[in-house]
Image (spheres, helix red, strand yellow):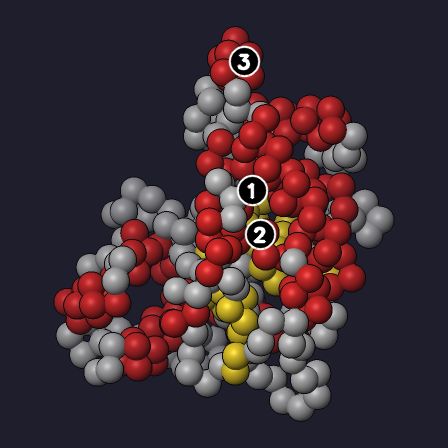
């Protein structure tokens, strides 16, 4: 993992830190490594959501990537599930499945792709996670960064927003929204680069960004209710807590400090242990049970309980 300096403080203690340009040992059992980005990195771009992409264009990342066959990019508000242990994308690369806009959004993305000279196969509905062959990651990440900057700087000008309004849509979520420039960039870059040979619907996978924009709860009136997932944990690679973090317990997953996090977690579960279900730790463990079991194992360590 590559992390901003402040975020590196929550990396598990058993992970080994690598110096810049240092590469991990490819031999031996699976291990956890991380590398700190420079202090100046967080201030390197005006579009803050671009920070989770820009590091992949650095020479340090390129050096590390050579040690791997596949690279997964995930937001920090996510949990890796057992399905990742035995799954690689069937079609070479995969992108997370999820709602990313209206029909207007998707038609406009195809027009932007054509304007910029990129191939587009009409595949949409992608989120932020991708799992890509290491041989493609350099070109793909470079295109993602360039497209994210293009959308953020060029596709939401007053003139363009007037055009959007004339067409019956809005320069706001979910029609045409500047703050999801990286999602729009992913849509175009995946269609143009990740096909083998042509990008297909099968490459937009529910195994990634699971429940990010699905798993609806009537109680919450929102998505991200992991108990609504129909899948077993073994069949999912990664859950994105995009909505879940705003609803779980006393909202400890959205805390801004460690003290607030631990206080809210203890208010949610006084012993920092989630209620156990019948499938706890079994081969048929649900997505929700696995997630709660991970929290029950990590919260005491994080909060020195």
Indicate the position of residue 21 as horizontal and vertical percent values: 65, 72
Indicate the position of residue 35 as horizontal and vertical percent values: 54, 71
Crowding at dot 1, Cα within 10 Å, few <14 / some 14-19 / many 20+, comes out as: many
- For the residues labelled 2 and 1, say whether their Cβ atoms are less than 8 Å apart: yes
Q: Which mark is residue 2?
A: none
Residue depicted at 73% across the width and 56% down the height = 138
What residue is disc 3 on? Answer: 159
Element at label 3: helix
The residues bearing labels 3 and 1 have C-alpha atoms spaced at a distance of: 21 Å
Say which label, 2 or 3, has the lower sequence index. 2
Asked whether, in this view, residue 133 is left or right of residue 210, the answer is: right
Indicate the position of residue 42 as horizontal and vertical percent values: 46, 53
Element at label 1: helix
Quadrant of the image for the N terminus? bottom right
The residues bearing labels 2 and 3 have C-alpha atoms spaced at a distance of: 28 Å
Taking depth in this image into account, of 173 and 218 the one nearest to the observer is 173
Say which label, 2 or 1, has the lower sequence index. 2
Q: Which mark is residue 53?
A: 2
Residue depicted at 78% across the width and 62% down the height = 135
Indicate the position of residue 102 as horizontal and vertical percent values: 52, 29
Taking depth in this image into account, of 255 and 121 the one nearest to the observer is 255
The mark lying in front, picked from 2 and 1, is: 2
Q: Residue furthest bottom?
A: 28
Q: Quadrant of residue 24?
A: bottom right
What residue is disc 1 on? Answer: 182
Residue depicted at 21% across the width and 83% down the height = 305
């Amino acid at each position: 993992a590559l992390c901003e300096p402040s975020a590196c403080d929550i990396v598990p203690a058993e992970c080994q830190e690598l110096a810049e340009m240092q590469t991990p040992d490819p031999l031996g059992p699976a291990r956890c490594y991380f590398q700190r980005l420079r202090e100046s990195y967080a201030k390197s771009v005006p579009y803050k959501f671009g920070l989770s992409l820009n590091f992949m264009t650095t020479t340090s990342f390129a050096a590390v990537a050579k040690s791997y066959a596949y690279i997964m990019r995930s937001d920090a508000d996510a949990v890796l599930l057992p399905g990742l242990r035995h799954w690689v994308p069937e079609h070479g690369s995969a992108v997370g499945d999820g709602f990313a806009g209206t029909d207007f959004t998707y038609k406009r993305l195809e027009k932007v792709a054509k304007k910029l000279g990129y191939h587009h196969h009409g595949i949409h509905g992608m989120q932020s996670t991708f799992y890509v062959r290491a041989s493609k990651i350099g070109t793909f990440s470079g295109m993602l960064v360039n497209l994210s900057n293009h959308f953020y700087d060029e596709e939401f000008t007053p003139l363009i927003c007037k055009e959007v309004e004339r067409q019956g849509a809005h320069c706001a979520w979910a029609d045409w929204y500047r703050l999801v420039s990286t999602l729009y960039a992913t849509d175009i870059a995946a269609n143009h680069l990740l096909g083998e040979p042509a990008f297909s619907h099968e490459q937009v996978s529910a195994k990634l960004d699971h429940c990010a924009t699905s798993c609806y709860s009537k109680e919450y009136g929102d998505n991200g209710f992991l108990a609504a997932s129909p899948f077993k944990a073994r069949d999912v690679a990664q859950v994105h807590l995009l909505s879940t973090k705003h609803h779980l317990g006393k909202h400890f997953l959205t805390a801004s400090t460690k003290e607030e996090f631990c206080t809210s977690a203890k208010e949610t579960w006084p012993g920092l242990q989630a209620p156990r279900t019948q499938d706890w730790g079994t081969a048929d463990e649900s997505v929700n049970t696995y997630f709660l079991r991970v929290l029950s194992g990590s919260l005491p360590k994080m909060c020195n309980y």
